[in-house]
Amino acid sequence: MTSNTVSIHDAGHLPVWRRPFTLLALMAFAMPMAFATWQALLNNFVHVVAGFDGRDLGWLQSVREIPGFFAVGVILVVMFIHEQLLAVVSLMLLAAIVAITAWFPHFYGLLMTTFLSSLGFHYYETVKMSLELQWLDKTEAPKKLGWLIAIGSGASLITYLTIMLTWKVLGWDYNTLYMMGGGITFAIALYCGLAFPRFEGSEMQHKHMVLRKRYWLYYALQFMAGARRQIFIVFAAFMMVERFGFEVHEVTALFLINFIANMFFAPLMGGMVSKYGERKALAFEYVGLIIVFLAYTGVYVFGWGVVLAAGLYVLDHLFFALALAQKTYLQKIADPKDIAPTAAVAFTINHIGAVVLPALLGYVWLVSPAAVFGVATAMACVSLILALMIPRHPEKGNETIFAGRN
């Protein structure tokens, strides 16, 4: 990391290629190169090579979420390492472990590599969220966050397209693909560490845990989002492999469609949050998810076909872009000095259900996959109720509708 320090207010005088948003955009592009490679190959790799069933996959995903549960540890780490440097180092750890994933094609080996790569991923995501909310102006944050999602989707699109073509046409194996995805991310992360100055926000962040009563609704939204997200990440894609027999290139093609859609819709969703506010945006997301999860249940109960299931998967993924409304809600209600510790605490809260649910629901999956999606429907209903508690104009002192203001 270069040693010079630049205030966030003075960063606008730097060349575009050295500004804070450029750094955020580069990291947003780099992370999916590794993570999307891991995700695209995971279900087929564990099913075909490692012989996993739903129970094994549930345990693997629970282990993957343990670092997220302990993301609050970021507060201790940033006492010794600047947040920006921690983001870069975490990204490099993720990349390095993804690159060697295929070297450990058995249950305990995959638990180990999954845990270490997840440590890099979750610490990176925690710090990245903090940096975004510190560096982006409140009036521009929704739209710029939408663009960062679109940039990440573009990187995922390139990754999935490459995997699909090289697997089917060139016959590349798992090891080559893992090495390629991890290696590219590592190179970009190294560049990010060397090419940019250290940016300092306008407010010095608290270096201790922050739990405030007035943030309770944000904490609740994070808890429900983490629990519900795991059902989609763990079981929706696995359904396409186990029930409909999707191969690597077919799963990758499905991911490909997801990220093409997100490239176009994420900036629009950022504009939607900016125009209509966090309450309406999140309510729209959760109503859509209720419909999607009910339809997933129908795939198993009524035997609905693969085309509908694939369409639901794409629609489900599309709603994730609206999660940026939770970030901007926090940005509006939080004390500026609380951003970094609250981001860390929120990630831990987000992963409470994420650690427990995959393993627990993995056993439920063996008995009734439809019941798993029924649980997800109930969670989306609770999230909708919580979203409707956000006021039309959230700010410090007006965090919920119970504050008596609009």
Image (tube, rainbow, N blue to C red):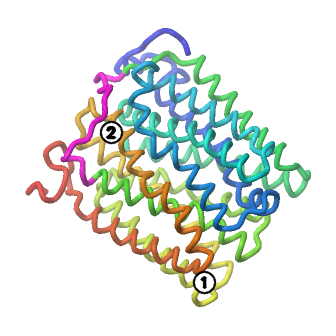
* Residue of label 2: 342
**Above-or-below relation of 357 to 20:** below
- The image shows residue 172 at horizontal and vertical percentages of 88, 49
Secondary structure, mark 2, is: helix
Give the main secondary structure, helix, strand or loop, of the magenta stretch. loop
**Is label 1 in contact with label 2 (beta carbons under 8 Å)?**
no
Question: Can residue 110 be seen by looking at this rendering?
Answer: yes
- The image shows residue 401 at horizontal and vertical percentages of 16, 59
Q: Residue at x 43, y 74 (%)?
A: 377
**Above-or-below relation of 143 to 133:** below
Q: Residue at x 74, y 38 (%)?
A: 99
- The image shows residue 61 at horizontal and vertical percentages of 59, 55
Q: Residue at x 25, y 65 (%)?
A: 388
Question: Can residue 270 be seen by looking at this rendering?
Answer: no
Count the numbered circles shown. Answer: 2
Earlier along the polypeptide chain: callout 1 or callout 2?
A: 1
Label 2 Cα crowd, 10 Å radius (few <14 / some 14-19 / many 20+): many
Q: What's the magenta region?
A: 201-217
Any magenta on residue 170? no
Secondary structure, mark 1, is: helix
The three-letter code of the residue at mark 1 reads: Tyr
- The image shows residue 384 at horizontal and vertical percentages of 33, 67
Query: Residue 244 sits in which quadrant?
Result: bottom right
* Residue of label 1: 300
The residue furthest right is 170
Distance Cα–Cα, label 1 vs label 2: 40 Å
Q: Is residue 203 left or right of residue 323?
A: left
Q: Is residue 346 left or right of residue 114?
A: left
Q: Residue at x 27, y 36 (%)?
A: 210
Query: Residue 32 sits in which quadrant?
Result: top right
The residue furthest top is 4
In the image shown, does 76 or 226 lie closer to the viewer?
76
